[in-house]
Image (cartoon, rainbow, N blue to C red):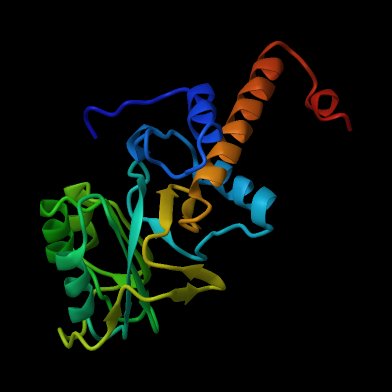
Amino acid sequence: MTGKIEVSTDYLLKQFSSKKDRGPTDVTMESIDLTTSQISDALKNLTGEYGVIPGVKPIKKNLKIKGRVVTVKTKQNDWGTPLKAIETAQINDIIFISCDGDEIAVWGELFSKYSQKRGLGGTVIFGAMRDIEAVYNLNYPVFSRAIVPNAGQPKANGETNIILECGGVKIKPGDWIFGDYCGVVVIDKELVGDVIEEAAKIKMNEDKILSQLEEGAFFSDILGI
């Protein structure tokens, strides 16, 4: 994405540690350069949970997502409900779709193009998608459990903006999602500032270790083992 501004982890720490409101307000999410690995480690440190949605991977490795969640619950043979979410979501929101299976696609080229046109930040599917080549070429970020050629019908019998649970992970409307080539991590909206602060500390420590390794230090000595 053009125009991206990246800021140092020192700056992130100052921004989040100095505010009672620890949400991403003064620093835009676009400026936060953290990996899902760092965020998952931060969640584990703070909550004991990893926050990782099992089995979901990006269809294209160089595309990342970060944004607030709009949730969808639908049957895998009903692709009409995701359409309702697309048309109510705000710019940069992430559509998160929970299906009852991954043998029938609920997402494809037309929805990806429509979402891209509306300025959405990406789509996560705990289920299946199709039209992989066309979506790949759009450069619209889609994360999915499965890829199949067949689709159901536009029944629109599901629900949007409700609490979901996928693979033991709870996803609420307004929670934050980060996604990259490793997968997808969900952060509770009440914890996002704390998690980003902790992840920034982790990143700083990793950068320090990498620097020591470049200087010839033994990893075991750095870790004290």
Residue 150 visible somewhere in the drawing: no
Q: Which residue is nearer to you in this view: 46 or 23?
A: 23
Residue found 37% across the figure and 66% down from its top: 173
Work out whether 14 lies above or below 177: above
What percent of the width, then of the height, locates residue 20?
A: 52, 41
Work out whether 116 lies above or below 26: below
- Position of the C terminus, as image quadrant, is top right
Q: Left or right of 204: which side holds 97?
A: left
Q: Which residue is the extreme one toward the top?
A: 215
Q: Which quadrant holds residue 97? A: bottom left
Q: Which residue is the extreme one toward the right?
A: 225
Residue found 61% across the figure and 26% down from its top: 204
Q: Left or right of 63: which side holds 12?
A: right
Q: Which residue is nearer to you in this view: 159 or 79?
A: 159
Work out whether 42 lies above or below 188: above
What percent of the width, then of the height, locates residue 199?
A: 57, 39
Q: Which residue is nearer to you in this view: 218 or 176?
A: 176
What percent of the width, then of the height, locates residue 211?
A: 65, 16
What percent of the width, then of the height, locates residue 3?
A: 23, 27
